Amino acid sequence: MIVVGEVAGLRKKLRWFDNRPLCGRRILVTRSRQQAGVLSKLLRQGGAEPVELPVIDIRPLTDFTRLDKAIAHLGRYQWAVFTSINGVEAFFDRLNHLGKDARSLGGVKIAAIGPATLAALAQRGIKPDYCPFEYTSAGLLAGFMRMAISGQRFLLPRADIADKDLTRGIRGMGGIVQDIACYHTAPASTSLDAAAILSRGAIDMVTFASSSTVTNLVRALKGKKSLLEKVKIACIGPKTAEAAMKAGLKVDIVARVQTIPGLVSAIEDYYAREV
């Protein structure tokens, strides 16, 4: 579109696109292909140009034996703890595959780590009994510490690579935990070349929404980790930031609210301070 004439002089009054907080920023989204869209949409609304480079892939299990056994005996658990949307989707997909539905959880208390997981459960007619104020494993544990959970059985349907902090914490309070993989997280097989994208110098910031995205992007760079020195690094929370720092990266942003909207808000605040 080309504007000719006196109307061009109205730009300062009518401009809206380049007044957005992330206008002109190219931001790398490393989430899985299934989940990248939510972050990309919010970044685009802020004026950024998201560049999607999925470095993790969410896949079904090859062996459902342990998960199926847990689902067959859901009545033995006092709590089921969901720590991600992926965990909710994988668990309920398997529940449905086995001819069951949400009624199988009728006598089980439900905990959700944060608002996105809450929403995924709500779509399946589940209203969780507990969600922490801080959307982390530490936040969940702080809440359980105020409850009498000694001797109670906990089911944790999670990723096969989930860290064990939550499991150890519940066991430390006397809880009996079954930490069961309900989906597989693997490095993404993508035709996009991470090193090529970063070496062009057109990326302003890289976002990490989990520790596994950090690990897999560094691995995808194949020894060219120095390319990440030229960009800003934004992490969804302290766990992810810790993984980034352990990988030798300088972390510029750690979201206070550990959600995707919270991450975008932290990025917008960061650039607002630069103005």
Image (cartoon, rainbow, N blue to C red):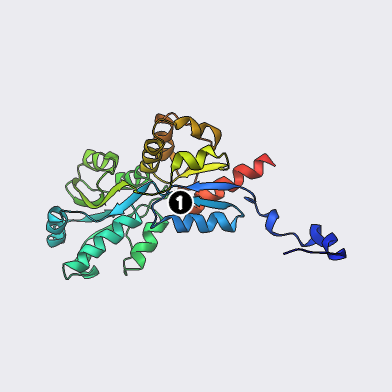
At label 1, which amino acid type do we have? Thr
Residue named by callout 1: 259
State left or right for residue 141 relative to residue 24: left
**Residue at x 20%, y 45% (from the top left corner):** 175
On-image quarter of the N terminus: bottom right
Q: Is residue 253 visible?
A: no
- Residue in front for this viewpoint, 272 or 217: 217
Residue at image location 51% in from the left, 50% down from the top = 51
Residue 103 position within the rendered picture, expressed as x and y whole percent measured from the top left: 22, 70
In terms of depth relative to the viewer, which is nearer, 140 or 194?
Answer: 194
- Residue 257's x, y, as percent? 48, 48
Give the camera-side residue of 123 and 45. 45
Q: Position of residue 62 (x, y in %)?
A: 18, 54
237 versus 37 height, above or below: above
Picture quadrant of residue 204? top right
- Residue 135 place in picture, x, y as percent: 40, 48
